Amino acid sequence: MHARWLRLPILHFAAIGLALFGFQALRTRHASHVASLERAPIVFSAERIAALQTDFVQRFRKAPSQEQLSALLAQAVEEELLYREARVLALDFHDASVRRRLLEKMRVVSDHPERSAADLVRDAQALKLDDDLVVRRLLAEKMRIVLAQDPAAPAPTEAELHDYLDRHHAQLERPAELTFAHVFVSERVHGHQVAKHARRTLAKLQSEPASDGVALSDAFPFGLEMRAYAHHRIMARFGKVFADRVFALEPGVWSSPIASPYGLHLVRVTEKSARRLADLAAVRQQALQGVLKERAAVRLARGMARLRGLYEIRIAGRDDLSTLAHGLAVRPTP
């Protein structure tokens, strides 16, 4: 009797509900605990600022301007905030990339590299080998992802997609396109007579509109009709000069010989469409990805603002950095 009662579906649903409720409560308490932790100030010493300047000089062969130094400092502050908070949240605890990095380092310096991976990772952490540039970058990027994510966010609405399309129509417009036929005159086939043969072929096409262009053409590896080609596609295949001349043609008329890297071409445009706005159906996936990226960027910016509120940031040892400190909302210290 008891076994049958334990198999009731309603009991299973109730148990799942209680488990989820308990998990959410634990998660909420954990978030509250993390938010209440006291965080050590982030201090940028004169030596650290000098290292930023030295790195800039090595990369660009000149000293950074005040504005460039400000940008370098802002980036360094952001990376430090992300790294510190990733460590607070223990994002490195089960990160495979971080573990792999620590194992590589520990197997080089350990007297017993044959020990288990777990033991080597613990030893590396005890020796502070996890505080290196590679691990810092891994954790900073992981923290960016955490700040930008919201698994519970609803899917973009039609209104958001249309708004994105309105704001980015220049990037999402469909370019002008041509459909054209061409008769190819090959220099390899006709040698120094190629231009003369091209003129004779053009005269035949003009005097006999029903002439079969395919029969008059030499073999061309990409075919004799190009459908719905934008300027950049024509340029990629035939070169810029060819693309410019073809786009200047009036539809329905055979052109004079136009050169390409392959030889000479007699071209007739059959269809020409102007640059036009794309409809949502044609660019839905691009608009969807665009809205999601914008949402993520907003969440990341808000997350960074929250982190700046959790940490005191100091710039020490340089009086001339007070303007930089003001721009970054940090405090210069003696």
Image (spheres, rainbow, N blue to C red):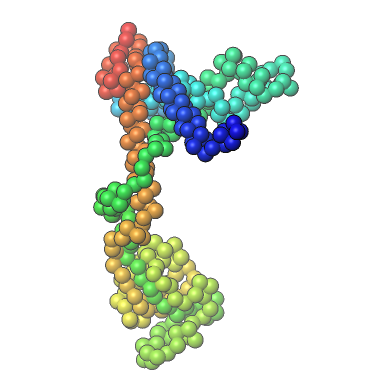
For the image, the number of numbered tags is 0
Specify whether residue 56 is in view. Answer: yes
At 30% across and 76% down in the image, what residue appears? 250
When asked about the image quadrant of residue 181, the answer is bottom left
Position of 101 relative to 257 (above/below): above
Viewer-nearest residue: 144 or 198: 144
Position of 196 relative to 334 (above/below): below
At 39% across and 48% down in the image, what residue appears? 289
Viewer-nearest residue: 144 or 276: 144
Specify whether residue 143 is in view. Answer: no
- 208 sits left or right of 190 in the view: left
Position of 132 relative to 194 (above/below): above
Give how far across and how far down residue 59 sits, in percent. 45, 31
Give how far across and how far down residue 125 sits, in percent. 58, 17
Q: Quadrant of the N terminus?
A: top right
At 35% across and 68% down in the image, what residue appears? 177
Viewer-nearest residue: 289 or 183: 289
Position of 276 relative to 199 (above/below): above
Give how far across and how far down residue 280 sits, in percent. 32, 58
Give how far across and how far down residue 173 sits, in percent. 31, 58
